[in-house]
Amino acid sequence: MKKKNKKLWCIILILSLVVGITQIPLNAFAETAKNWTGVILTPASGATIPSSSNAMFGFNSQNILAGNGRATGNSPGGSGALYLSSDGGKTWNKKLDKIHAVLGISGLSDNKTAYIVGGYSASGVGTLIKKTVDGGQNWIDLETTFTKQVGDIWANISRSTLLYNVLAVEENITYVISDNMLYYSGDGGQNWIQLNYVEDTSTISKNGIVSNSLKRAGNLVYFASKNQFYKGNLATPNTPFVAYDAPWDKTYTNNKWMAQSLISIDFSDELNGWALVEDRSDSKYAYILYKTVDGGMHWKQLSGVTDYKFNDVEFPTSELYVVNNQQLYAFCYGATGRIVSSNNGGVTWKYEETNAERSIKTNYVRFFKFGDEIRVYPLLSGQIYPTQYALHKVTGTAAVPTQPSTPPPVAKSGAEAFDSGVRISWTPSAGLGYRIFRSTSSNVLGVSVTDFYLTGTSYADVNVQPNTTYYYTVKSVLSEANPFQGTDEQLGNAIGSYTITTGNSVYKAGSYKNFIILQIDNPKLSKNGIANEIDPGKGTAPITISGRTMIPISAVVEAIGGTVQWDGTAKKITLNARGNKVEMWLNKTDITVNGVSTKMDVAPVSKNGRTFVPVKFAAENLNCIVNWINSTKEVVIVYEE
């Protein structure tokens, strides 16, 4: 792989991640954070770590494993070695020598248990899989058992015997991937079964599964292939992962990889994830950041560019690391390799380290988080980089995120009646999502209030009767129904049961109604239980001005099937929805409804390029009912079908 114009590519990566939906001035992302320190690494003598490997794992901030070796080539197998550092990576001791290439390492938080996997593909079967239970001092061979149990599978499909990565989840839950297989062990590596076979339909490929994509976030376990996202659940760890179509699609055409190729993927929790993709469609190089808010079932483009090509340099970034829903890091490789970061969920990015003495002159890195500290360890062309810095950062000194520093209030698990119905909230639980059942009898589960399962942790039930006692039960969804395989949706135990009596009057009881929920400082809008960003990628959220709740009106009007028009000359906002026409003016309290003029007590304002209007005056004049839930700072807009 050629490595040219590395400094230029660093700039291109940043541009790629911020240009697109929003035009960002250069000074918005050229800011540099200088709160990193460096530690010199002593070379680990021996062969190299393959550039495609993720062969490093940290038990803690001091005890770190790193592996190397060539998985392919003309030299015989056995060129690999495994190293252990007991001082945070400053010095390394060789623990295993003359083994097959180490391509993946994963361990547990007990500081004792870890697995290494890999192999050698040039001369027949060359599988590597070993386990330690004493922190890397001694290793148990699992190759014979593993290959005996999966050998027939390999023989039938004639695929590589290389193992590309491993994920140790718990003492008795371990996953391993090859180029197109997912394997599972429920007894510490003694027995293995195949869970998924990822069919490869491209002309040439050795990586149906993206090797660095096998990861975990809470109870979500996942990996990605060239065109799909696979997710499993630790509540049922030995069941095949469910596949979802992904926006990236890697194909091989005219002796070149074309279309979108997944570079790196990472999740902050069971619902929120990011995927960094290189796009070479039509021979144009671009970098796109995708985001999911429903655990990988759907992906939306967050930012990116669509028309950049500089020489034939490929993959200018090798790692995406997500700390939380706001803080993201990525690495831009090259002669002056740099770390870039985002404090607003990937919308805008900045340089993290520009000190030439501390720049990571390498192509690949590994991110680790130990307590409040983030560490970045370099790998260079297959070597643990000699006489070079590993960068350490204490996250407490990070720049203030652009999102509100005070998180929106979260209601405790429970239910409460409001003017138009009942609001239910519950604490998060393991699973794909949630089902809410409603009944008028305490002895009957009742019916699901939605046809689909929910992914959020709150819901407004507006299709209720007045003066009626309801019994609600919330259950987690462990697996989806698959009518083609004859399987039903699998539910877990009840995670919440609530009894609530509605008020004397409910808005248009007996008619079917829709609802929209918005929350102060929360950038998501929930319509009938399905949450999406109000303004994708921009963090736009409702605010309060002079005691009034101000909302970004376009998202709400479009959600109820209406349209919004903007007259830049007159600075007029025109809303058309549900048979009504509402006209308002920026920074004026005048309002006209179907030609009749009146006054509001708060004027519409422009903030960050978006128009905010008082929700009470806008929604109620579009034949909607507006309710306020004080305990959660939420606005609930209710309207008939």
Image (spheres, helix red, strand yellow):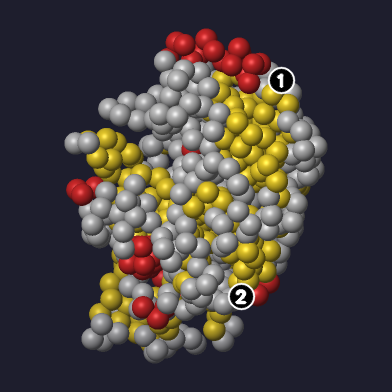
The residue drawn where x is 38% and y is 37% is 227
Question: Is residue 35 visible to the viewer in this orientation of the structure?
Answer: yes
| 555 relative to 437, above or below | below
According to the picture, the residue beneath numbered tag 1 turns out to be 190
Label 1: how many Cα within 10 Å (few below 14, some 14–19, many 20+): few
Mark 2, secondary structure of its residue: loop
According to the picture, the residue beneath numbered tag 2 turns out to be 35
The residue drawn where x is 47% and y is 62% is 361
Closer to the camera in the image, 387 or 534: 387
Closer to the camera in the image, 357 or 7: 357
Question: Is residue 176 visible to the viewer in this orientation of the structure?
Answer: no
Residue 577, position in %: x, y? 34, 64
Label 1 amino acid?
Gln
Residue 433, position in %: x, y? 60, 41
Label 2 amino acid?
Asn
Closer to the camera in the image, 208 or 300: 208
Q: Is residue 542 left or right of residue 252?
A: right
Label 2: how many Cα within 10 Å (few below 14, some 14–19, many 20+): some
- In which quarter of the view is residue 156 placed? top left
Residue 155, position in %: x, y? 47, 11
Q: Is residue 257 left or right of residue 450?
A: left
Closer to the camera in the image, 638 or 336: 336
- Tell me the CA gap for discs 1 and 2: 45 Å
The residue drawn where x is 57% and y is 61% is 387
